[in-house]
């Protein structure tokens, strides 16, 4: 009898361990993620710019939003109000279920592989959805290194989506990884289009970007800049 009880106890321990392991591997993984709140993977954050609550332009009727979704390539140079930038970023890659660390966009195996960079006249920032803040990566205006397409130098904000391959180790080969990175990118891009439609902003999804120059500027090692979206008032 004692042996049977011991055996059942041992089995429960093993099962519990396996369950804990499963939970761990389901979480988005980046081995080098936040060390002290300042270093994120390969990226050095020197300071955080807090964002206001993301509440602007989110109550537009879906039918109107879909009807008005379109590519715009002509932008005003005027800065976006910070409230609008905050809402744009929440729609791009914010948490809609923060208690589960889940986002407004889906991702294959919930790998949440994207890093969202924001280029402005003042600097280049990494969006931190948890803090609702922008982490400064590079000071100064680097908008025109994104692409030779002229509107990048004019639009006050450009979002650059970088697939971080450190979080995609679960895919068995590069072709599978790249397929899911490209698919996941589409959801983010469409959210940007829809927010811009709702908030009467212009945007264009751009694949024609200088991926090498972006990588060099940002300093990430294992990833790829996939798409960029300049955003501005029309
Ligand atoms: C993956 C992708 C890459 C694109 N790359 C560029 C680009 O580099 N430059 C550009 O001006 N437009 C680019 N576009 C915008 C398309 O040209 C545009 O969506 C298309 O002409 C349809 O227009 P619409 O978005 O107004 O429906 C891209 C769109 C997608 C989906």
Image (spheres, grey):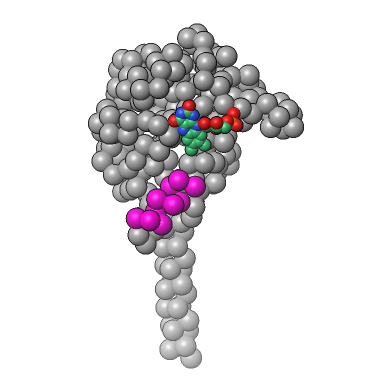
Percent x, y of residue 154:
43, 13
Q: Residue 84: which quarter of the image? A: top right
Is the residue 226 above or below the residue 178 in the image? above
Percent x, y of residue 177:
39, 53
Which one is in front, 40 or 73?
73
Percent x, y of residue 55:
62, 23
- Residue occupying image coordinates x 36% and y 43%: 164
- Please identify the dominant SS of the magenta region: helix
Is the residue 173 above or below the residue 189 in the image? below
- Residue occupying image coordinates x 51% and y 27%: 204
53 is within the stretch colored magenta: no
Q: How many marks?
A: 0
- Farthest bottom residue? 1
Q: Is residue 46 visible?
A: yes
Q: Which residues are magenta?
A: 174-183
Percent x, y of residue 90:
54, 30
176 is within the stretch colored magenta: yes
Q: Residue 113: which quarter of the image? A: top left
- Residue occupying image coordinates x 36% and y 13%: 122
Quarter of the figure with the C terminus? top right
- Residue occupying image coordinates x 32% and y 34%: 211
């Amino acid at each position: 009898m004692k042996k049977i009880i011991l055996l059942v106890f041992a089995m429960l321990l093993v099962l519990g361990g396996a369950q804990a392991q499963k939970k761990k591997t389901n979480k988005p993984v980046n081995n080098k993620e936040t060390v002290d709140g300042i270093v994120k993977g390969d990226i050095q954050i020197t300071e955080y710019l807090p964002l206001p609550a993301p509440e602007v332009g989110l109550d537009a009727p879906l039918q109107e939003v879909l009807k008005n979704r379109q590519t715009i390539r002509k932008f005003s140079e005027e800065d976006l109000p910070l409230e609008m930038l905050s809402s744009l970023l929440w729609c791009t890659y914010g948490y809609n279920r923060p208690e589960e660390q889940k986002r407004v966009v889906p991702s294959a195996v919930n790998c949440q592989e994207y890093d969202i960079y924001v280029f402005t006249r003042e600097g280049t920032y990494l969006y931190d959805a948890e803090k609702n803040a922008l982490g400064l990566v590079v000071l100064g205006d680097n908008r025109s290194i994104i692409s030779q397409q002229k509107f990048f130098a004019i639009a006050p904000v450009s979002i650059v989506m970088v697939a971080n391959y450190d979080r995609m180790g679960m895919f068995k080969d590069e072709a599978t990884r790249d397929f899911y990175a490209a698919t996941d990118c589409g959801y983010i891009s469409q959210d940007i289009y829809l927010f811009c439609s709702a908030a009467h902003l212009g945007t264009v999804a751009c694949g024609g970007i200088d991926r090498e120059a972006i990588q060099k500027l940002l300093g990430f090692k294992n990833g790829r800049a996939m798409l960029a979206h300049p955003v501005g008032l029309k």
